[in-house]
Amino acid sequence: MRLGTVVLSRGRLLAVAAVFVEDSERDLVRFDAKIDTGFTEWLGLPAKDIEVLGLEVVGMDVVLMANNEERSIEVYSANVVWGLQHYNVRVHRVGTMPLIGMSLLHRHVMTMDARNGGAIEIVPGD
């Protein structure tokens, strides 16, 4: 079971959960990431966090943004601890806040109390 929290930020509710990413020294770094059901990939991290982790570019992806604009962005590879599982995932360079995407949530069940301070529970679904 993983717990996150619903937080009020600039007048908007955000669902936030912890994810741990391995840096170049193999130490785990905790990120409080926004759960983004519109983000189909695994994990998104801002450039400053990618630099701190020492991740290397492994390619480029063309992505479709919410405004229907296509954009080419850098992709990295990282080891992630999500719950009790270890994953090697694709990390997309994103704006200013870490994002948990639908690929990381795949095969999990999320329950959320959608109010400021509400709990988020994420458990394996099968």
Image (cartoon, rainbow, N blue to C red):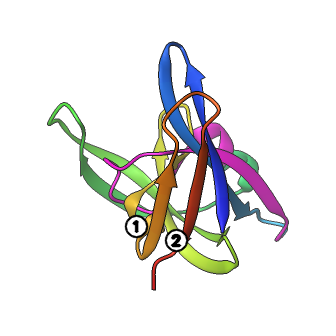
Q: In this view, does 7 lie to the left or right of 39?
A: right
- Using the image as rendered, state which of residue 50 and residue 18 is in the foreground: 18
Secondary structure at badge 1 equals: helix
Which quadrant of the view contains residue 61? bottom left
Q: Does the magenta stretch include residue 39?
A: yes
Q: Is residue 23 left or right of residue 60?
A: right
- Using the image as rendered, state which of residue 64 and residue 121 is in the foreground: 121
Identify the residue at horizontal 65%, vertical 38% (top origin): 48
Q: Position of residue 66 (x, y in %)?
A: 23, 36
Q: What stretch is highlighted in magenta?
A: 26-49
Query: CA–CA distance between discs 1 and 2?
Result: 9 Å
Q: Does the magenta stretch include residue 25?
A: no
**Residue 39 visible (yes or no):** yes
Identify the residue at horizontal 45%, vertical 67% (top origin): 109
Q: Position of residue 112 (x, y in %)?
A: 50, 48
Q: Are marks 1 and 2 in contact (CB under 8 Å)?
A: yes
Q: Position of residue 47 (x, y in %)?
A: 58, 40
Secondary structure at badge 2 equals: strand
Q: Mark 1 points at which residue?
A: 103
Mark 1 neighbour class, 10 Å CA radius: few under 14, some 14 to 19, many 20 or more: some
